[in-house]
Image (cartoon, rainbow, N blue to C red):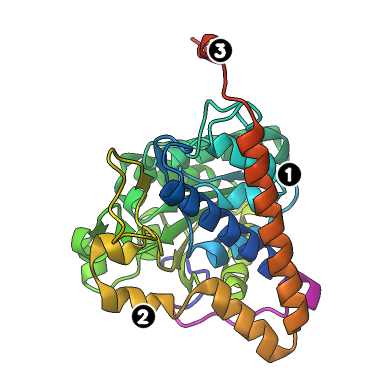
Amino acid sequence: MPHKIAQRSAPRKQQVRRDQLAWMYTQMVRIREFEESVKRTFIEHPGVIRGHSHLGDGAEASIVGALSTRHPTDFVMPSYRCHGYPIVLGTPLCNMMAEVFGRKDGLCHGFGGSMHLADPARYFPGTSGMVGQSIAHATGAALTAQVKNSGQIVYCFFGDGASKQGAFFESLNMAAVWKLPIVYVLENNQYQAYTHFRLEDANAAAGDRLSKKADAFSMPGATVDGTDPVAVRTVIAKAAKRARAGQGPSLVETKFYRLSAHGNLITVPPLPTQFPEHEAVAVYGNRKEFEQWKAKDPVKGFRARLLKDGALSEAAARRIESAAHAEVEEAVEFALASPLPAPEEALEYVYA
């Protein structure tokens, strides 16, 4: 019989303290403010951010719910859509924004950019621009933790499209055989670059959840509402507990909607003004779908829920939002004031 973390129906909600709920909302707002600022910079100031930047607006509940179960020394390894994770880990937003802007005071001295953030001091080793590559890196980190008996586990995040890469199958097979301490979080944001996931996945087209892929490796699999941070926390907590107990990996699919397009890329000339927000609907053209998911915006939805339940007051919510906005504005000012790396430094961090 295949392992199960939870039934396909909604998992029973854990009791979460008011301070934990406030923390979760704070982190979700900080992520959203950061992503909106990056988006505005692309639109209003072409050339400040060079190359690609992949936003994660819509993924806030998935990120925060999962990482709310993390121990301080556990590794976190996502793919190139990576802004939200180090924010939750406590990475200074000033240095993050400077890296996105390609400035010398950035996390990687401006050489990594938006797709290659890293903060090893906070157990965030780095990300990869290759689809699915982070899965192999994270599995290697889990093997290291097992061999060293460090007690650490690894949180590995990747998109639905990456679950078709060879690295996915090879890594999950190895992790299952060796019972590696890792939680695989498949973030199903509905689109694989520019194609809806149901058009590329036969199982998905048949209505099956993507977490069913766990059955092939005899590991637990579960699908959870990725717009609900408490539901995500409940399912991920079970997977993390299993990994810490030496029982091996799990695959959790969090389902939500990417509100922005696959990736922003400054073009010459700039994108026309009819795409003012680089929203997903501007690229994919499905207005009905976009509006349905927009109504489930995880940040707005969680705010309304906390207010309704009395876990947060309107005044407290506004303080959180104001503080996050000010923090991001300060990060932008810091990044703009930071110098660009000197051309002669281009090979300084290159190793053979």
Q: Decide if residue 268 is on the left or right side of residue 219.
A: left
- Please say whether residue 143 is visible from this viewpoint: no
Q: Nearer the viewer, residue 62 or 326?
A: 326
- Quarter of the image that includes the N terminus: bottom left
* Mark 3 touches mark 1? (CB < 8 Å): no
Residue 93 at x, y percent in the picture:
67, 46
- Secondary structure state at the residue bearing disc 3: helix
Q: Earlier in the sequence, mark 3 or mark 1?
A: 1
Residue 232 at x, y percent in the picture:
57, 69
Q: Which residue position holds label 1?
A: 73
Amino acid type for the residue under numbered disc 1: Thr
Q: Which residue position holds label 2?
A: 292
Mark whose residue sits in front, 2 or 1: 2
- Secondary structure state at the residue bearing disc 1: loop
Instruction: Give the alpha-carbon distance from disc 3 to disc 2, as whole Å.
Output: 48 Å
Q: Nearer the viewer, residue 164 or 299?
A: 299
Q: Earlier in the sequence, mark 2 or mark 1?
A: 1
Mark whose residue sits in front, 3 or 1: 3
Q: Residue at x 44, y 57 (%)?
A: 186
Q: Crowdedness of circle 1 by 10 Å Cα count: few (<14), some, many (20+)? A: some
Amino acid type for the residue under numbered disc 2: Gln
Relative height, residue 185 to residue 111 (above, below): below
Mark whose residue sits in front, 3 or 2: 3
Instruction: Give the alpha-carbon distance from disc 3 to disc 1, as whole Å.
Output: 32 Å
The residues colored magenta run 8-21
